[in-house]
Image: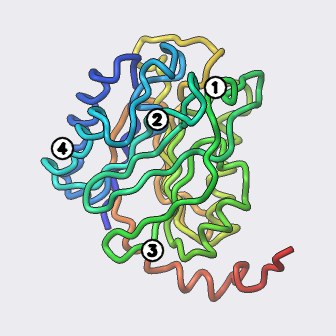
Amino acid sequence: MRIALAQVVAGSDPLENLSIIAREAARAAEDGAALVVFPEAVMCRFAGPDLAEIAQPLDGAWADEVRRIAREAGVTIVVGMFTPADTPGRVRNTLLVAGAAETAYDKIHLYDAFGYRESDAVEPGLQPVLFDLDGVRIGLATCYDVRFPALFRALADDGAHLVLVAASWGSGPGKREHWELLTRARALDTTTVVVAVGQADPRTTGRDDGVGAPTGIGYSAVVTADGADLVRLGDAPQTRVVDVSGALSAVAEVRAKIPVLANARRF
């Protein structure tokens, strides 16, 4: 399986961001990718307009255009968007999966940390989500979720060999170190392959969003089931296609050597 890490910088206009998705999906397809993973909040960056004003349902025009892009490119796309919540004026932070597989995941753990309160505008999701693509069981997670091992354990217990983490990681002292440590730890403590794709640092494009809202720091990665970086990008925008077939085929061997899933006590 060839997976594209589409480390982009999203803007505030959902229509303009669709053009970014189309461009990078086409590039990834040309390089043989079957799955293109975009970051969280690509529909609209957090440091933008009122999220409730731009949120659309999963059967709305924005999601349908992502589906059209996926069909035209011949890939499956995973991308962060915002959908209306049950409570008026609030949204859900949603990962849309479009293409050969079709599903959606609403972010469970909301980023109420480091002086930011995602829960002021966002309602949490309620359950883990997995899907199957090309014979691989794949779990989904979003940004702050990576700090909660129980979610990744639940995904692995439900058969995941690969977990996709889409992020718009906040900048600040120690945050890169946290991101790199946590993405490796979640792979190692569940013996799954983790593909973690964050938004690039907007400052590398000449844009400074300040430190109020999480935008991105880059450093997207593919981490093997034994916790080693197979690929780790830098901070600038980049779409990188990675063949993860070897890493996936090694999962069974890693789990035989490090049987943390089999040995774990469930309380």
Sequence-first disc among 1 and 3: 1
Circle 2 is placed at which residue position? 83
| Mark 2 element type | strand
Circle 3 is placed at which residue position? 248
Q: Is residue 30 visible?
A: no
Residue at 34% in and 68% down: 133
The answer to whether the residues at label 1 and label 3 have Cβ atoms under 8 Å apart is no
Q: Position of residue 6 (x, y in %)?
A: 36, 41
Specify few, some or many for label 3: CA neighbours under 10 Å numbering under 14, 14-19, or 20 or more.
some
Specify few, some or many for label 1: CA neighbours under 10 Å numbering under 14, 14-19, or 20 or more.
some
Displayed quadrant of residue 144: top right
The answer to whether the residues at label 3 and label 4 have Cβ atoms under 8 Å apart is no
Circle 1 is placed at which residue position? 171
Q: Position of residue 44 (x, y in %)?
A: 43, 24
Residue at 39% in and 37% down: 57
| Mark 2 vs mark 1, CA separation in Å | 25 Å
